[in-house]
Structure formats: structure tokens, C-alpha cells
Image: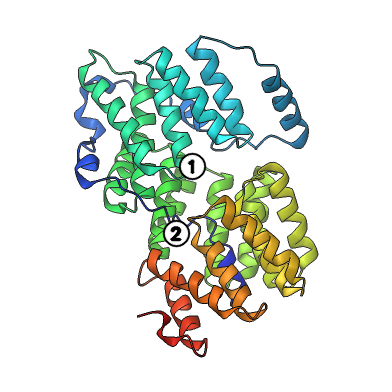
Amino acid sequence: MRLKQAFMIWILYGCSTTATKEQNDKLDISPISENKDLKPKVDTQSIIDWKEFFRPLPTEKERSILAKKLSVWPDTAKPGDLINKARMEVALSQYKNAETSLRQAVRLDSKSIEAKLDLVSVFLRLKDTPSAFEFLTMVRDQFALANEVKKSELIKYRYLLAQTYLSSQDHERAHRVLSDLIGYDKSFAPAYIALAESYMAQGKNETAEFVIGRGLDRIGDTAAFYALKGVLADRTGQLDEGLLAFDKALELTPNFVPALIGRAAINAQRLDYTAAEADLGHALSLKPDAIEALIAIGIIHRKKGNITAAKAALTRALDESPENLTARYNLAVLYADELSRPEEAVRLFNEVVQSAREDSELSQLSRSYIGELKGYESSYQ
């Protein structure tokens, strides 16, 4: 297997979802410009700050301080306090705790759009697309009944709506919403980034590159844009250009986890495992649930011949993110090539084939492996 298979940093595989088409159709994707009450424009920087899109993740020291604050957090019946508590829990990757805090905030104040939108953001992190659609629908219904809609809340709603469509693999609707957000405010960086990620997930690299370039032209240097440029360069085998792009991203935002993982990917391909492991260790210290980093560490251990450590890392990645097809594929490769357990390998490869897009690279690689495992050609029909 090519090492770069581990480093699909930005690709959105999404998760299986029971959200129906009717549920999706209930949500509004009409252009923002049709709402005449949205003038003057909202300060979209406040939305970026709310998403913590470009803020560095907390360092180990800062995580310790946040954990200490949460450990003595008083019981409260104030929705605002619960929202603040949930945001601290999100910063520590305690997503289920954040969900509990925000649900309590909604119970105390059923009209709190802020709490509901934060809940949608948490559901996306938990890969719970149906619940995200459910609360987006609640917010949309509140907007329909309101005499006035806060501009900031509408932009947050629209951005989260696009992200939820992406999570459910509905790229067409997501693109309409994201393009409209860019048309509304050409400086809204998260929309460019989500749009580029979507095109990359579909293999439309040239279109993604155009979107990234347009974002850089209009907004200027941003770590996420350079990290995406690094991924695109890696995909086309331009490792030197990719390394420069990731270095630039980390110069702009030293603790930007996707760039740390991307740089590790390139260094691993160059067999510079020491540098790769240093970046991956740093990434995990900032974001312990960074599944891509766990997968990458597992593959590096395998390349170095440390099969036990490789299995531990890949198994942990799959346990923490069962829907992650890259983790499932790489664990299957380990079973097939290193552990002589073809039955387990075939089972995992079949699960990848069943969940991945038929034309995806992971699906094709899994089919190839299934065919090569002697005596198990008939396991996949």
C-alpha cells in the first residue's frame, strides 16, 4: 500500500445516515440575497472566531487549566453558563460531555438558537448527521416564526447547514450554500475551505485548487489554505512543493494540526520517520482524537517493522472512529500482509467496499486485495 493512503486529511467520507431526503428538503438553501433584512452585512470574523477555525488548539498547559476549571464547575441553571462550559469541553475534545451540557441549555431555554447551533457543531464532530439535521430544522422553524433574524445566527446556520450536507455526501446542496456564503461575503474563509475540501473529496483537484487560489487572493495568507495546497501537492507527487506549503501553514499557525499531519505524511514518504513521528506526536498532544495522526503512526510503525505497535495504533483509531474507512483499510492491510490473518483482512476489506463510493480509490484497492487473498476470492460477490 502506498503510504500516502493514510493521510486523507481533508476528505469527508461522512458516516452512514438515516436522514431522509424529505428531512433535507425541509431546510432552506435559497440565496441569502433574497432576505432583504440582511443589510448591512454581518461581521463574518465573529463567525470565524465562533467556529475557532483558525485559533490554535490549546497547548498541554492550557488543556490542564481548562480541565481544572471544568472539574470545579458549579452546577448551574443558566443556559449561557452551560454554553460556555460546552465550548470548554469541545476544546478538550469531550464531545459527549458538550452534548450533555448543550442539551441541558436547550431544555432550560427552548428558544436558544445559540445552544442549538453549538449542538449542531458538536453533532458534526460526533458524526451524528441525523441529529444535526434535526436541530437545524428546529432553528429553521424558529427563523420562519421570528419577526427579526440575527445576521450572525443566520450565517452560522447556513455554514453548519453546508457542513451537514457535506457530512451526508450531498455535495450539490452544500456547494449552493457555500457559494452563496462567498457571494454574500467574499472574505468568509471557512466557506472557501469547505468548498475546496468538498471538491477534493470528489477528486476534482483542479477545481479545488482554483477555489483555494481565489481564497488566497481575496483573504490573504491563511494556514488552512496552505495546508490544502500541501495536500494537493502531495496527491500529485510534488513532495517538495507540499512540504513548503505545510511549512508555510505552520509558520502562520504553529499548532495547526492538519498541517502537522500533512507534513508528517510527506516526511514519512521520504522515510524521515523521526521528523514524521515528532509532528504526529505534537498533533496528538494538541488533539488527542486526531484519528488521521493515529492512522499515520500505525503505518509508520508497520514500515519500521513494529507490528504490535502498528496494530495498537490502528485498532485504537478504528475503535474511536468506527466509520473511518482509512483506518479500517489500513488495519485490513496489516492483517493481510503482516499478521497472516486473511479471514479478518477479508472481513475488513469487504466492510470498506460496502461503505465507500464504488469508484473511490479505497474501494478499488480493497477489491484488489480481496482478489489476491488466495482461497477467499468468493468472499466478495
Q: Secondary structure at mark 2?
A: helix
Does the rendering let one see residue 152? yes
Indicate which disc residue 209 carries: 2
Image quadrant holding the C terminus, namely bottom left
Q: Where's residue 153, x and y in %?
A: 37, 24
The mark closer to the camera, 2 or 1, is 1
Q: Tell me which numbered mark, 2 or 1, is placed earlier along the sequence.
A: 1
Return the residue at label 1: 126
42 in relation to 314, above or below:
above
Q: Position of residue 21 (x, y in %)?
A: 21, 47
The kind of residue tagged 2 is: Glu
Image coordinates of residue 223 in percent, x first then y, are 59, 46
Vertical placement of residue 199 versus 36, above or below: below
Mark 2 surroundings within 10 Å by alpha-carbon count, few (fewer than 14), some (14 through 19), many (20 or more): many
Quarter holding residue 317: bottom right
Residue sticking out furthest to the bottom: 374
Crowding around mark 1 (Cα neighbors within 10 Å: few <14, some 14 to 19, many 20+) is: some
Q: Nearer the viewer, residue 361 or 48?
A: 361
- The reply, left or right, for residue 268 in relation to residue 203 is right
What residue appears at the point 65 percent right and 16 percent down from the top-left corner?
73
Disc 2 from disc 1: Cα separation = 29 Å
Residue drawn at the location 37% of the way across and 21% of the way down: 113
Task: Work out which residue is located at the far top of the displayed protein and give it.
Answer: 77
Whether residue 264 can be seen here: no
Locate residue 238: give its quadrant. bottom right
